[in-house]
Image: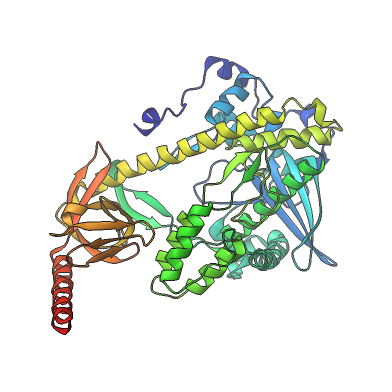
Amino acid sequence: IAIRSHDVPQAWPPAVEAEIAGLDEQVPAQAKRGREDLRELPLVTIDGADARDFDDAVYCEATPKGWRLLVAIADVSHYVHPDTALDKEAFERGNSVYFPERVIPMLPEVLSNGLCSLNPDVDRLCMVCEMIFNGEGRMIRSRFSNALMRSHARLTYSEAAAIMVDLDEQARKRRQPLVTHLDELYRLYKVLRKSRSARGAIDFETTETRIVFGAGRKIERIVPLVRNDAHKVIEECMVAANVAAARYLERHKMPTLNRVHAVPSGEKVADLQEFLNGLGLGLRGGSKPTARDYSAVLKMASGRPDEHLINTVLLRSMPRAEYSPDNIGHFGLAHEHYAHFTSPIRRYPDLLVHRAIRHVLAGKKPKGFPYTVENMQVFGEHCSATERRADEATRDAIDWLKCEYMLDKVGETYPGIITATTSFGIFVELQDIYVEGLVHVTALGNDYYHYDPVKHWLIGERTNQIFRLGDPVNVKVVQVNLDDRKIDFELSEKQQRKAGSKKVRSKRKSSRRKKSQ
C-alpha cells in the first residue's frame, strides 16, 4: 500500500532486465586489470546481522605517528554507466527504500546483493579511500584508487564489539588474524570521537526502534535498537571517507553533489533562544549559533529532568540535510566539506561522486566530465525529493503495522510521553511500546486550550492546566483507524483526576489572590 501511495518504483523495466542479463556472477578477468590489488589486505565488512548488501569494508594499522585507515567501497560506477537504462532507473529511484522485512533496491539484486556487494572470500571491484591520521585524529592526507579486494570476514556489529570493546576471548580467538587490525581501528575511533567533540559536532541521543515479527508476519513486539561502539566505529570511518571525497573533488574543481546541512533559520533560532531562556538556559552565537553552541546546550541539559524536551526542541529547530552542488558545509557534523561517497549501492548521489572521482583518477579535466553544475543542481533536488519519499513511504508502512498491532489493545491504558504539541491536541508515544497516537484537544478536559509554539505547550484558559512536550501522561487507547493509520487516545481516569486536582489548586490560588486584593 505504501509503495503504491507514494509512487515508489518497484518493477524493473524490460530495458534494464536486458542490460543486466549479460552480467556474470563473477567479476570478469579483464575488469580486474590495471587495479591496485588489495586481496591480501585483511579488509572486513561490519554490518547488521540482517544486512544483505555490503557497501563498505575497512582496514586499519598503526603508523609511527598515528594510523593508516582504508575504506573500500563497492565500485558501482564500473557496472552502472551514464545514460544507460540501468542508470536512468537508478536515478528515478534515487535510493533504496527499506521497509520492515522488505527492501525496494535502487539497483537489481544481481548487482546490489551480487557483483557489487563486498561478500566474504570473493573478488570484488572497489574504490578505496586511504587516509593517514596523526595521533590527534587529524587527517594528514588521503588518496583514492581503483582497486581489487577480497573481504576477509563478514562481521556483525555484535561480533565486532565483542572483539574490540569487550575483549571477549572466544571471539578474539575465532578471528585471531584480524584482531590486531580491529584493535587499531578501535584506538583510532576513540581519537576520532575526541576530535568530533572538539570541533563541536552535534550528537543527539535518539531512540530508533525495530519491529519483531511473529507468526503470520504480525508484529510480536517493538524494541529499541541498541547501538554499540562497533556502530560508531563504522560511522566515524564513513564520515572520514565522505569528508576526504568532498575535499578531493573540490581540490580538483569537479562538479559534484555535496551533502549539505544548512544553519537554522533566524526565526527558528529566535524561537529556540526564547524557549531556552524560559528554562534558564542560553544559546550562544546570537542569531548565528554554531554546532558547538548547540552542543554546549546539550551538555548543559544532560541529566536534567527536561533533557528529552530540550533535545527534541533543538533537533526540530534544524533543517533537513540535502544534496546540492553548492558547498555550504554540514552544520550538524561541523564539517566544511562533506559528500556522500560510502553507499553507492543504495544512494544515487554516491554513484555520482564515484563517477567524478573515477574521472579525476583517469587523468581527465573537469570540462570533459559529462555533468555540469546545472545538471548536479537537478540531480540534487531530485535525490533530496526521493529521500523524502522513501522516508514518508517507510513511515507510512510502519504506521500501518503499528495500527494493526494496536487493534486488540483498544481500552487498554499505558504510560506515555508527549512527543508533540499542536493547536488540535497532543501526540503521545507509549512507553516501552513505541507507538504514537493523538489526544485531541477536545479530550483534554472541559477547558479552552491555547497553543504556544515557542514554549511547546497547551495551556488551559480557565484551569492553567499545561500539557508540554516531554511531559509524562497516562492515556487510554480509544480508537484505531487502519485506513488513515491513526490511533486516538484519551487521558486515563488517573490522569484526569490528576488534572482535576491541579484545577482545584488553581482555583484556590485564584481565590487567595482575590482576597488579598
Residue 460 in the image: state x and y as whole percent. 21, 62
Give above or below for 79 relative to 181. Answer: above
Q: Residue furthest bottom?
A: 516
Asked if residue 129 shows in the view, the reply is: yes
Give above or below for 90 relative to 451. Answer: above
Q: Residue at x 85, y 67 (%)?
A: 64
On screen, residue 480 versus residue 157, left or right, reads left
Q: 185 or 243: nearer the eye? A: 243
Residue 382 in the image: state x and y as whole percent. 56, 31
On screen, residue 289 versus residue 361, left or right, reads left
Quarter of the image with the C terminus in it: bottom left
Residue 86 in the image: state x and y as whole percent. 60, 23
Q: 290 or 149: nearer the eye? A: 290
Quarter of the image with the N terminus in it: top left
Residue 31 in the image: state x and y as whole percent. 77, 29
Give above or below for 171 relative to 114. Answer: below
Q: 370 or 164: nearer the eye? A: 370
Q: 500 or 72: nearer the eye? A: 500
On screen, residue 351 versus residue 5, left or right, reads right
Q: On the image, which quarter does residue 354 sit in?
A: top right
Q: On the image, which quarter does residue 456 sit in?
A: bottom left
Q: Residue at x 66, y 53 (%)?
A: 239
On screen, residue 65 versus residue 125, left or right, reads right
Q: Residue at x 78, y 54 (%)?
A: 131
Q: Residue furthest front?
A: 517
Q: Residue at x 47, y 26 (%)?
A: 9
